[in-house]
Image (spheres, helix red, strand yellow):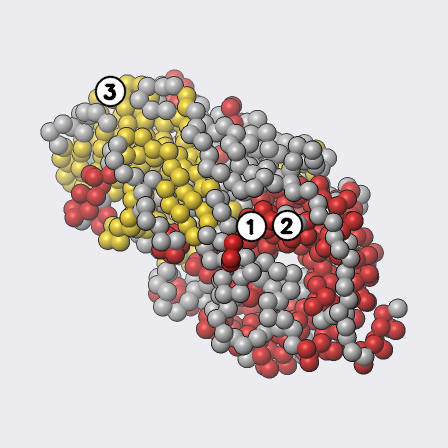
Amino acid sequence: MLKKLRHKLTTKLSIRTSNKKTKPSKPYKTYETSPPPQPQQEQPQLTLPVQPPSPTMHHFTKKNKPFLFPQTHSTVLPDPTNFFSPNLLSTPLPTNSFFQNFVLKNGDQPEYIHPYLIKSSNSSLSLSYPSRFFNSSFIYQVFNPDLTISSKKIEPLSHSNHKISSYNDLSVTLDIPSSNLRFFLVRGSPFLTFSVTQPTPLSITTIHAILSFSSNDSLTKHTFQFNNGQTWILYASSSIRLSHGVSEIVSEAFYGVVRIALLPDSDFKHEDVLDRFSSCYPLCGDAVFTKPFCVEYKWEKKGWGDLLLLAHPLHVKLLYDSDCDNVTVLNDFKYKSIDGDLVGVVGDSWLLKTDPVSVTWHSTKGVKEDSHDEIVSVLLRDVEGLNSSAITTNSSYFYGKLIARAARLALIAEEVCFLDVIPKIRKFLKETIEPWLDGTFNGNGFLYDGKWGGIVTKQGSNDTGADFGFGVYNDHHYHLGYFLYGIAVLAKIDPIWGRKYKPQAYSLMADFMNLSRNPNSNYTRLRCFDLFKLHSWAGGLTEFGDGRNQESTSEAVNAYYSAALLGLAYGDTHLVAVGSTLTSLEIHAAQMWWHVKAGDNVYDEVFAKENKVVGVLWSNKRDSGLWFAPPEWRECRLGIQLLPLLPISEFLFSNVDFVKELVEWTLPALNREGVGEGWKGFVYALQGVYDNESGLQKIRSLNGFDDGNSLTNLLWWIHSRGNEDEEFGHGKHCWFGNYCH
């Protein structure tokens, strides 16, 4: 049939109308509301926030019981009972969180809870205001235990582990039972706040020498300076009598709340700021999606006065964009960070407003009409090559890429008005997707793990290395994003099929994009997305000394973009809104921390000079290398931040000046022997943004493509580049803009 279709190229192409789709029922409630005040457990002085159900959105109506893949008992997952309190074990647990190291192996690897590195043991907690080490290849923060806090008298329970007794989007509460200590670790707090739950003598040790020590008359404020230049201030809820030696401070029995903060730059002009806000402390914090392209931070606080926290550079940008009048930014009150300067913000809640992005099936500016013939001729060849029985991989990642590659062909066919190939693409998509959703795929498949609460693969349930660690919750948004893209397209072109497999589709989506706080949910809340950093992590349940990490921002963008497309396919405006919001935030974060632009001053000059893009970004490190390639393979570094090539890529790489810098930095690497043709294709695609003709000629000369890409897709990209002098950033061409803010 396809051979006959080639004869139609000389005829005028016409747009075919598609059948009108029936509107399915909405599986979401309207929008997430603010969580209610949380009930608290009674205890002296302080209360512990717990996590009850809150009226957030749900992914399914009561009529449609959520679909679960067959349950499995993984042989490779760690035991969550070691570090989570028993009251949390009946709920889905986080697998990519900012405190993940606290619940893996011995729980003693540090985590970066801005502005401090925190390390916990069974009897103590260590605090570090990290220094940075950097060269042209990497930047990392150095952990030195500036303060170690414990009980002077360790209880007989010292063999017991520390426990996570509560966690939220912006905070985690960590208990050390053997020392009668409860730490309220709130992200962005310049104070380390902890409660001594019963009268206990305290010990605070340091690796430095104590040069000076002073106390106020009421013994509620103590200032100490170390020989490394640091000055720390300790505030107490009541009098605490301290004495010190060369490197240890000890107290008499104390019961109450203690707050400790580093004095920025040891400059006493900042002391008044710490004094003024020392009496108001946060217990926990949550992020709420109040409306499209907005995230609101809310903290539960104790004490009196206003709340002081720290904002990273992306926070500051989004706060200014939102014209938030209920916060005050203290631009001169700063802490150093690997993410850029952290500045003081005063306010009980923050409203972060991100630029809207358009989630569309097709390119925003359209394909040039005079290029249709070239695209269609290549499209016919690519579609003719689709053969589900010839697929040899059973990897969830590579299989998902093949599905998404075929789905791109369908949408490109629509865009160039050549719908005759749609039936063959639809057949291929059905043959490749259905076995994964039905559980009939040979050699692999999706299963449900009840221990942590999420989807794993059959291969990954007994092999940590299978499917790139999917079985230990690594890369979930990458793999599932590709599947969702294919499912969304198939549901679009075949609504009857879409209705049949909607429960499975929403289960895949909810695995990494569930917003519910309901303890009866099957999945944890936003498995990969970090609501403080405003981007995703991909590390899963693997202990890393530098915390969580993420390599490919573009595959993360694809995940939330594909979820939004799923919403378009099913008429689910709420899913469109949430997916679009997360897409926009992920793009902002990629442009802030992965794209190294001239003059942006985020990173140290020696690193920024040699790198136009970060390879792997860790919570505590920036690495120029990739998991699969050395730093010198710059084409891979560019490509892994661009693939898959989609309409949303226009927003991710909307800064044409940066695109040119990046491509010119990369091109010399293509002269290396053995460079893959697939990686070249991504470099030429970006070159086509500012030099369309050169990019086109180089793409035409390629003799191979990435397994998730095709010549059709590259030609679509080149021929859909419009006037790049026209502003094409967030919001300019957003159909959703009228409904935002």
The residue positioned 28% from the left and 48% from the top of the image is 328
- SS for dot 1: helix
For label 1, the residue is 577
- SS for dot 3: strand
The residue positioned 27% from the left and 38% from the top of the image is 306
Nearer to me, 593 or 249: 593
The residue positioned 67% from the left and 65% from the top of the image is 709
Chain-order first, disc 1 or disc 3: 3
Q: Is residue 614 left or right of residue 283?
A: right
Residue type, label 1: Ala
Q: Residue 722 appears at what percent x and percent y?
A: 57, 75
Residues at badges 1 and 2 in contact (C-beta under 8 Å)?
A: yes
For label 2, the residue is 567
Chain-order first, disc 1 or disc 2: 2
Chain-order first, disc 3 or disc 2: 3
Q: Is residue 605 visible?
A: yes
- Residue at the extreme left: 217
For label 3, the residue is 253
Image height check: is 647 above or below 687?
above
